[in-house]
Image (tube, rainbow, N blue to C red):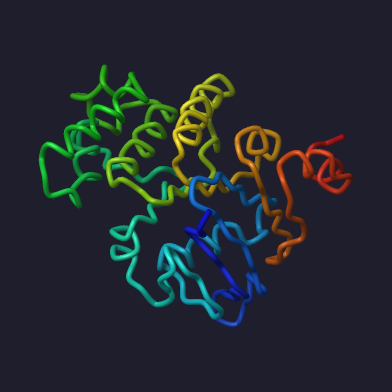
Amino acid sequence: MSNVLRVSNVTAGYGALRVLHGVNLDVAEGEAVAVLGANGAGKSTLLRCLSGLLPFSGEALFLEQSIGGVAPHVIARRGLIQVPEARHIFPDLTVHENLLVGGTAMPQRSDRMRVLDEVLALFPILAERRRQQAGSMSGGQQQMLAIGRALMGKPKLLVLDEPSLGLAPMVVRELYQAVRRLIDSGLTVLLVEQDVTLALQVVSRAYVLEGGRVALTGSAAELRESTHVREHYLGC
């Protein structure tokens, strides 16, 4: 499998404050990989680098092209599409309008409608609420909408930033069932998650960030059995 994303020696921060210190990771085509870690580990900073929102040193290649210094909208059009933490939907637009905004990069209406049908099949609640103002929906429904909007852009790499944050356990289970179906379909996914148990149930590999450095990496099975992970992240 070829690499969709390769990050090499990426260092970044805010002013004089360095947050990432030589991070290396890669994601192969069709693979689901997690970036795990506590608050302040550097996960969000890494995603800001990958999305073109924060300058960095080192190298980040997406589909074998550098994304260093590339504008966020250009990165998204290349196919690296992020579902940000806290969703950031358009609250005054309807569900249907939000989804269509996500598909603006597809010039053919027939293509947009085909992908729309796929999204509504993945999240039936969005089909039921398609005329509803997005801001009036529950947090879980808004998260489904945010993922659906990202899928409308036909991502080559879907980046999910803390999708379970602030949601009820039953909603999280439903959401992650949909994420698992996306992964099983062959979509390449980079998942950033504080809930280590949850993340390791759906990905094949993971990186653990601590203090802006990769402290551990391995298969999901290896990390579940890691003494360090069990003591510091799984509470056992």
Residue 191 vs residue 185: left or right? right
Q: Nearer the viewer, residue 151 or 128?
A: 151
**Residue 113, percent from left and from top:** 17, 33
Query: In the image as oriented, which residue stretches furthest toward the front?
Result: 1
Q: Nearer the viewer, residue 113 or 166?
A: 113
**Residue 233, percent from left and from top:** 78, 43
Q: Residue at x 50, y 71 (%)?
A: 60
Q: Quadrant of the C terminus?
A: top right
Residue 27 vs residue 150: left or right? right
Q: Nearer the viewer, residue 30 or 216?
A: 30
**Residue 29, percent from left and from top:** 49, 51
**Residue 124, percent from left and from top:** 33, 19
Residue 150 image-quadrant placement: top left
Residue 29 vs residue 34: left or right? left
Q: Residue at x 47, y 46 (%)?
A: 188
Q: Nearer the viewer, residue 71 or 201?
A: 201
Q: Residue at x 12, y 49 (%)?
A: 107
Count of marks, rendered view: 0
Q: Residue at x 20, y 52 (%)?
A: 105
User: Does 213 appear above or below 38?
Assistant: below
